[in-house]
Amino acid sequence: MLEWIVFLCGAAVMILELVGARIVAPYFGSSIVVWTALIGTILASLSLGYWWGGRIADRSPSLSTLGRIIMFAGLCTGLVAVAKSMILDFWGLDSTPIYVAVTAINLVLFAPASILLGMISPYAVRLKMVTVEQAGSTAGRLYALSTLGSILGTFFAGFFLIAVMGSTSILILVAAVLILLSLGASLADRKAKMAALVLIILLGLGLNAYSGYLRGEGIHDLDTHYSRVFIYKSQDVESGRPMRAMATTPRFTQSAMYLDDPEALALKYTRFFKMAWFFRPSARSCLVLGGGGYSFPKYALARYPDLRMDVVELDPGVTGLARRFFDLADHPRLRIHHEDARTFVNRSGNTYDIVLGDVFNSQYSVPFHLTTVETVRRLDAMLDGNGVIIMNTIAAIEGPGGRFLRAQYLTFASVLPHIHLFPLQHPKDGQAVQNVMIVASKVPLPLDSPAPDPDVQRYLGHRWTSPIPSDVPILTDDFAPVESYMASNW
């Protein structure tokens, strides 16, 4: 039984870590900063658990004590399922720097269960040890089993559980398994353990009922292989028109659709992409990096009958949600590629009149490998001679919060001769964190010409005309500290 205990508790550790990343990502992103804090917290907690478990085992080794440790680990895991939203809502709206906030969140949510799970292996070694001569082989065997369990938990959670069950259900399942393991370790305190198991089951039923209620209200909290996605009812602030929105963080809406006109552009920043046809009126081919709710592809295909469009979306689950909730349908002039945007850019031999980029891996941060000069060179090679590139970023322009935007601007400028910035929400405020569109072309653009489209005409007046200082290096595959540059904005 001890072998099964260390094996399954090793699996529980890695399942908790992977699920922890999904829980935290909608509030703090999935950048290297978030993963560093999570992995560091789990390792520190396990180290403390190893030390503490060894000390307790030397004082009073018994199966009943081991059973209690496992039971409390299960209860702490179940508690995460209940408390995560309240704690994350509080910290997610706090102004604490991201390094501090995400570390504190991980400590509060995941350290208690990780410490208790870390106690199990050294305690099991002490119980299994018969003679000093067998100490090495006993410890090696049990720690190997624990590591094998961690490997299984990693693959099982990453390849299957997260996409099938969702984070909350997985936490409840792990908690229930741990409490059953505590009964397997020892029948001592079985009434307390049975009560704990019943409590976990009731919590699971209650959380599932609450999720059902939210779905009835039009709120969906869904997991794909790559993302945790929220779908919810909303309305346009100015017109009051009803909308359905998609978000991967509670504070920002990535895609939206008017319920009374699914092909219209509901979010203001997406309307800027119409600028591409002002710059390139005869465009017949367009590449879109980042699908999301497919708002602009639907709009463009409906209005430009000669347009051929390729959309690169990493997550097929997101495309499935766009089909289910955002009226995305198959179209003879639309090709969807489910792969990383960089790999598509690297391998594709196509040329395009227009390239649009709207890819993020956290609240603000563009995946670093899409920001580098190597990527820009590939985009330049894919661009028709008179074509245009428009990339959406969320950043400041000036000050410490604008380091990423300035680095991205200088990176584009090192390859393409004509680069312009368009801050959308606060066109005169370089310190504001906002949508900033990078427009790049091989040829001069008609920036002073009148535009018949009122959205395009308005955004033409947002062009940033102040000099961009060269105070940061260009971004390369070897050195692109995107998350570090963006951390001051979080």
Image (spheres, helix red, strand yellow):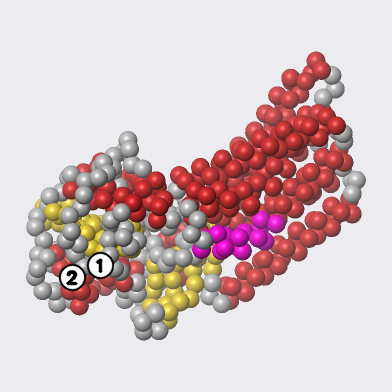
Q: Which residue is mark 2?
A: 461
Q: What is the span of residues highlighted in magenta in the rendered image?
A: 79-93
**Circle 1: residue type:** Pro
Decide if residue 2 is on the left or right side of residue 377: right
In the rendered image, the residue lying farthest to the top is 133
Decide if residue 260 is on the left or right side of residue 347: right
Q: Nearer the viewer, residue 314 or 87?
A: 87
- Circle 2 packing at 10 Å, graded few (<14), some (14-19), many (20+), is some
- Whole-Å distance between the Cαs marked 2 and 1? 8 Å
**Circle 2: residue type:** Gly
Quadrant of image for the C terminus: bottom left
Please tell me which residue is depicted at 21% across the width and 68% down the height of the picture: 462
Q: Looking at the picture, how far across and down is residue 114, in whole percent? A: 67, 44
Q: Nearer the viewer, residue 317 or 79?
A: 79
Q: Is residue 99 above or below residue 59?
A: below
Quadrant of image for the N terminus: top right
Please tell me which residue is depicted at 52% across the width and 49% down the height of the picture: 100
Please tell me which residue is depicted at 30% across the width and 69% down the height of the picture: 425
Q: Is residue 69 visible?
A: yes
- Main SS of the magenta part reads helix
Which quadrant of the figure has residue 149?
Answer: top right
Q: Nearer the viewer, residue 307 or 318?
A: 318
What kind of element bears circle 1? loop
| In magenta stretch: residue 32 | no
Please tell me which residue is depicted at 56% across the width and 77% down the height of the picture: 217
Q: Mark 2 near mark 1, Cβ–Cβ under 8 Å?
A: yes
Q: Looking at the picture, how far across and down is residue 190, in whole percent? A: 89, 50
Decide if residue 473 is on the left or right side of residue 19: left
Q: Which residue is mark 1?
A: 427
What kind of element bears circle 2? loop
